[in-house]
Amino acid sequence: MKTFNSTFVIIFTFIASISFTSCEKGDTGAPGPQGPIGPPGNVNVISKTVTVSSGDWISYSNPLGGNMKGSQKAVPEITSSIVSTGAVMVYLRQSYNTGGYYYQALPFNRVVDSNNMRSYHFSISTNLLNLFIEETDNNIGSLGSYTYKVVIIPANRMAENPDVNLLNYDEVKASFNLVE
Protein backbone atom coordinates (compact mmCIF):
# COMPACT_ATOMS: atom_id res chain seq x y z
CA MET A 1 0.00 0.00 0.00
CA LYS A 2 2.88 2.33 0.79
CA THR A 3 4.35 1.69 -2.68
CA PHE A 4 1.05 2.55 -4.33
CA ASN A 5 0.86 5.90 -2.52
CA SER A 6 4.47 6.75 -3.39
CA THR A 7 3.90 5.83 -7.02
CA PHE A 8 0.75 7.92 -7.12
CA VAL A 9 2.57 10.96 -5.67
CA ILE A 10 5.41 10.61 -8.19
CA ILE A 11 3.02 10.31 -11.16
CA PHE A 12 0.88 13.24 -9.95
CA THR A 13 3.98 15.41 -9.44
CA PHE A 14 5.26 14.50 -12.92
CA ILE A 15 1.91 15.33 -14.61
CA ALA A 16 1.57 18.60 -12.69
CA SER A 17 5.10 19.73 -13.58
CA ILE A 18 4.54 18.95 -17.29
CA SER A 19 1.25 20.87 -17.36
CA PHE A 20 2.80 23.97 -15.77
CA THR A 21 6.04 24.01 -17.77
CA SER A 22 5.16 22.63 -21.18
CA CYS A 23 2.96 25.56 -22.30
CA GLU A 24 4.37 28.96 -23.09
CA LYS A 25 2.41 32.12 -23.66
CA GLY A 26 2.67 33.39 -27.23
CA ASP A 27 3.41 36.91 -28.35
CA THR A 28 0.64 39.49 -28.14
CA GLY A 29 -0.77 40.19 -31.57
CA ALA A 30 -1.15 43.58 -33.16
CA PRO A 31 -4.27 45.59 -32.26
CA GLY A 32 -7.26 45.09 -34.53
CA PRO A 33 -8.64 47.76 -36.84
CA GLN A 34 -10.77 50.63 -35.51
CA GLY A 35 -14.46 49.72 -35.46
CA PRO A 36 -17.12 51.84 -37.16
CA ILE A 37 -18.28 55.00 -35.44
CA GLY A 38 -21.50 54.37 -33.56
CA PRO A 39 -24.57 56.56 -33.74
CA PRO A 40 -24.45 59.76 -31.72
CA GLY A 41 -26.16 59.57 -28.39
CA ASN A 42 -25.84 60.13 -24.71
CA VAL A 43 -25.94 57.42 -22.08
CA ASN A 44 -26.74 59.79 -19.23
CA VAL A 45 -29.40 62.10 -20.68
CA ILE A 46 -32.60 60.32 -21.66
CA SER A 47 -35.07 61.53 -24.24
CA LYS A 48 -38.33 59.71 -24.74
CA THR A 49 -41.66 60.33 -26.40
CA VAL A 50 -44.84 60.07 -24.34
CA THR A 51 -48.25 60.04 -26.00
CA VAL A 52 -51.47 60.85 -24.16
CA SER A 53 -54.47 59.49 -26.06
CA SER A 54 -57.86 61.17 -25.89
CA GLY A 55 -59.11 58.47 -23.50
CA ASP A 56 -56.17 58.98 -21.11
CA TRP A 57 -57.29 62.44 -19.95
CA ILE A 58 -59.06 62.60 -16.57
CA SER A 59 -61.09 65.61 -15.40
CA TYR A 60 -60.04 67.27 -12.15
CA SER A 61 -61.49 70.10 -10.13
CA ASN A 62 -58.78 72.68 -9.53
CA PRO A 63 -58.72 73.67 -5.83
CA LEU A 64 -58.11 77.29 -6.88
CA GLY A 65 -61.24 77.24 -9.03
CA GLY A 66 -61.95 75.87 -12.46
CA ASN A 67 -61.55 72.55 -14.13
CA MET A 68 -58.57 70.88 -15.69
CA LYS A 69 -57.64 67.60 -17.30
CA GLY A 70 -54.64 65.53 -16.45
CA SER A 71 -52.91 62.32 -17.32
CA GLN A 72 -50.36 60.36 -15.32
CA LYS A 73 -47.67 58.37 -17.13
CA ALA A 74 -45.15 55.93 -15.66
CA VAL A 75 -41.60 57.05 -16.46
CA PRO A 76 -39.20 54.80 -14.53
CA GLU A 77 -36.22 56.90 -15.64
CA ILE A 78 -37.41 59.69 -13.32
CA THR A 79 -35.55 58.40 -10.27
CA SER A 80 -35.46 59.93 -6.80
CA SER A 81 -31.98 61.26 -7.65
CA ILE A 82 -33.36 63.02 -10.75
CA VAL A 83 -36.24 64.48 -8.70
CA SER A 84 -33.91 65.82 -6.00
CA THR A 85 -30.90 67.02 -8.03
CA GLY A 86 -31.51 66.59 -11.78
CA ALA A 87 -33.89 68.13 -14.27
CA VAL A 88 -36.88 66.92 -16.24
CA MET A 89 -37.96 69.00 -19.21
CA VAL A 90 -41.24 68.37 -21.03
CA TYR A 91 -42.01 69.67 -24.52
CA LEU A 92 -45.38 69.51 -26.30
CA ARG A 93 -45.26 68.65 -29.99
CA GLN A 94 -46.88 71.48 -31.97
CA SER A 95 -47.67 71.57 -35.69
CA TYR A 96 -46.80 74.44 -37.99
CA ASN A 97 -49.66 75.69 -40.19
CA THR A 98 -47.44 75.04 -43.21
CA GLY A 99 -46.58 71.47 -42.18
CA GLY A 100 -43.89 70.01 -39.96
CA TYR A 101 -43.66 70.34 -36.21
CA TYR A 102 -41.68 71.77 -33.32
CA TYR A 103 -41.57 71.22 -29.56
CA GLN A 104 -42.83 73.88 -27.12
CA ALA A 105 -41.39 73.77 -23.58
CA LEU A 106 -43.89 73.42 -20.72
CA PRO A 107 -45.26 75.33 -18.91
CA PHE A 108 -46.84 77.72 -21.37
CA ASN A 109 -50.15 79.49 -22.01
CA ARG A 110 -52.03 79.91 -25.26
CA VAL A 111 -54.90 82.26 -26.04
CA VAL A 112 -57.94 80.25 -27.18
CA ASP A 113 -60.24 83.24 -27.78
CA SER A 114 -60.89 86.69 -26.30
CA ASN A 115 -62.37 85.14 -23.13
CA ASN A 116 -60.26 82.04 -22.69
CA MET A 117 -56.65 80.99 -22.17
CA ARG A 118 -55.32 77.42 -22.09
CA SER A 119 -52.46 76.46 -19.78
CA TYR A 120 -50.17 73.45 -20.30
CA HIS A 121 -48.05 72.31 -17.37
CA PHE A 122 -46.61 69.25 -15.63
CA SER A 123 -45.28 67.89 -12.38
CA ILE A 124 -43.00 64.97 -11.56
CA SER A 125 -42.41 62.51 -8.76
CA THR A 126 -40.32 59.37 -8.62
CA ASN A 127 -41.26 57.17 -11.62
CA LEU A 128 -44.18 59.45 -12.61
CA LEU A 129 -44.94 62.28 -15.00
CA ASN A 130 -48.18 64.21 -14.49
CA LEU A 131 -49.42 66.26 -17.46
CA PHE A 132 -52.12 68.92 -17.12
CA ILE A 133 -54.20 71.17 -19.36
CA GLU A 134 -56.62 73.75 -18.03
CA GLU A 135 -58.65 76.64 -19.40
CA THR A 136 -59.64 79.89 -17.76
CA ASP A 137 -63.29 79.59 -18.81
CA ASN A 138 -63.63 76.34 -16.77
CA ASN A 139 -65.01 74.51 -19.81
CA ILE A 140 -62.12 72.47 -21.15
CA GLY A 141 -64.24 69.97 -23.10
CA SER A 142 -62.77 66.85 -24.66
CA LEU A 143 -59.10 66.63 -25.59
CA GLY A 144 -57.48 64.74 -28.40
CA SER A 145 -54.17 62.91 -28.48
CA TYR A 146 -51.05 64.85 -27.45
CA THR A 147 -47.40 63.93 -28.01
CA TYR A 148 -44.74 65.06 -25.54
CA LYS A 149 -40.96 64.81 -25.57
CA VAL A 150 -39.55 64.17 -22.09
CA VAL A 151 -35.85 64.88 -21.44
CA ILE A 152 -34.34 63.60 -18.20
CA ILE A 153 -31.00 65.19 -17.25
CA PRO A 154 -28.82 64.10 -14.31
CA ALA A 155 -27.26 66.86 -12.18
CA ASN A 156 -23.70 66.20 -13.41
CA ARG A 157 -24.76 66.68 -17.03
CA MET A 158 -26.56 69.92 -16.11
CA ALA A 159 -23.33 71.15 -14.48
CA GLU A 160 -21.37 70.30 -17.67
CA ASN A 161 -23.82 72.34 -19.79
CA PRO A 162 -24.70 75.39 -17.67
CA ASP A 163 -25.46 77.67 -20.62
CA VAL A 164 -27.91 75.45 -22.51
CA ASN A 165 -31.33 77.07 -22.99
CA LEU A 166 -33.63 74.39 -21.59
CA LEU A 167 -36.68 76.14 -23.09
CA ASN A 168 -35.39 75.43 -26.61
CA TYR A 169 -35.73 71.73 -27.46
CA ASP A 170 -33.45 72.00 -30.51
CA GLU A 171 -30.67 73.48 -28.35
CA VAL A 172 -31.18 70.81 -25.68
CA LYS A 173 -31.11 68.12 -28.37
CA ALA A 174 -27.84 69.48 -29.82
CA SER A 175 -26.14 70.12 -26.44
CA PHE A 176 -26.84 66.65 -25.08
CA ASN A 177 -26.51 64.76 -28.42
CA LEU A 178 -30.05 63.41 -28.22
CA VAL A 179 -31.32 61.04 -30.89
CA GLU A 180 -35.00 61.05 -31.83
Image: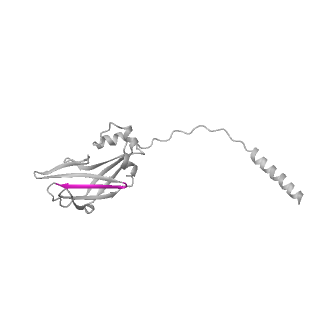
Q: Nearer the viewer, residue 173 or 134?
A: 134
Residue 144 in magenta stretch: no
Q: Which residues are magenta?
A: 126-135
Q: Position of residue 53 (x, y in %)?
A: 27, 60
- Outermost front residue: 63
Image colouring: one colour
The N terminus appears in which quarter of the rendering? bottom right
Q: Residue at x 39, y 38 (%)?
A: 160
Q: Position of residue 143 (x, y in %)?
A: 21, 59
Quadrant of res 175: top left
Q: Position of residue 60 (x, y in %)?
A: 23, 61
Q: Is residue 144 visible?
A: no
Q: Residue at x 31, y 50 (%)?
A: 149
Q: Is residue 12 visible?
A: yes
Q: Position of residue 93 (x, y in %)?
A: 26, 50
Q: Residue at x 17, y 55 (%)?
A: 135
Task: Report the side of 63 relative to 33 (left or right).
Answer: left
